Image: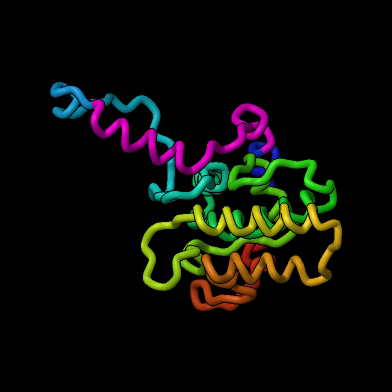
Amino acid sequence: MNWRKSLFIAAALLATTTTQTFAQDNLINALKDNVSDKSKEGFVFTPIINLGTTSVKDQGSSGTCWSYSGNSFLESEMIRMGKQPVEISQIFTAYYTYLEKAKTYVQLHGGQSQGQGGQLHDVLTIFRKYGAVPREAYTGLINGKTRNDFSQMSKTIEKMNADLVKNRKIDPNWQQALLNTMNEHLGVPPQSFQYNGKTYTPRTWLMRW
């Protein structure tokens, strides 16, 4: 895929770990009250260059800006290259990134930070290993939820991983226990789905680009 090189360049320029979710929410709430009377009138901008983008998404109370920005970059690259743009599931990418981070955490006996954060290159890593799905096929919103909130899920899986390392006795089913926890909060990622009248797997859908 031609956008791989572009993603690596963007990752080198923008790579940064995500701040904790509560800090993000606190910042947003603080800014609501820091508005001058003049700013309420709005701003007028003069377009110089208009770059194609897909719709704006809300990451909710989740430390997944790296997934949203990484997938958004790829969506915009499709437009730039003249391809039909698609909206990619950011939560699918985050789901499998958390699994891979947990594996590394256990392998290093806890010698790696946990948390919801990630980097732009994690998006491409998950694409290569697990594929991708359209946003409509997997939003991570279940049981009537309309906005993602990873706070409780993150605390639970971090404690599970830390306890596993601390006990020094690896349960052979620990990965499935981790997946079960994420499934409870986000739902099970689809292994096959319908898109524009055709059936795809995450890998075959990715390859159609």
Q: What type of secondary structure mainly makes up the magenta span?
A: helix
Residue 29: image quadrant is: top left
Q: Is residue 80 visible?
A: no
In this picture, is 44 found above or below 101? above
Q: Residue 39: x, y in percent?
A: 19, 24
Q: Is residue 177 left or right of residue 110?
A: left
For the residue pair 67 and 75, the one nearer the viewer reads as 67
User: Which residue is rendered at x = 62% and y = 76% of the image?
Assistant: 192
**Quadrant assignment for the C terminus:** bottom right
Magenta includes 159? Answer: no
75 relative to 12, above or below = below
Q: Position of residue 52 (x, y in %)?
A: 43, 42
Q: Horizontal placement of 53 versus 106: left or right?
A: left
Q: In the figure, residue 141 lies in which quadrant?
A: bottom left
- Percent position of residue 10, x then y: 62, 33
First to last magenta residue range: 8-34
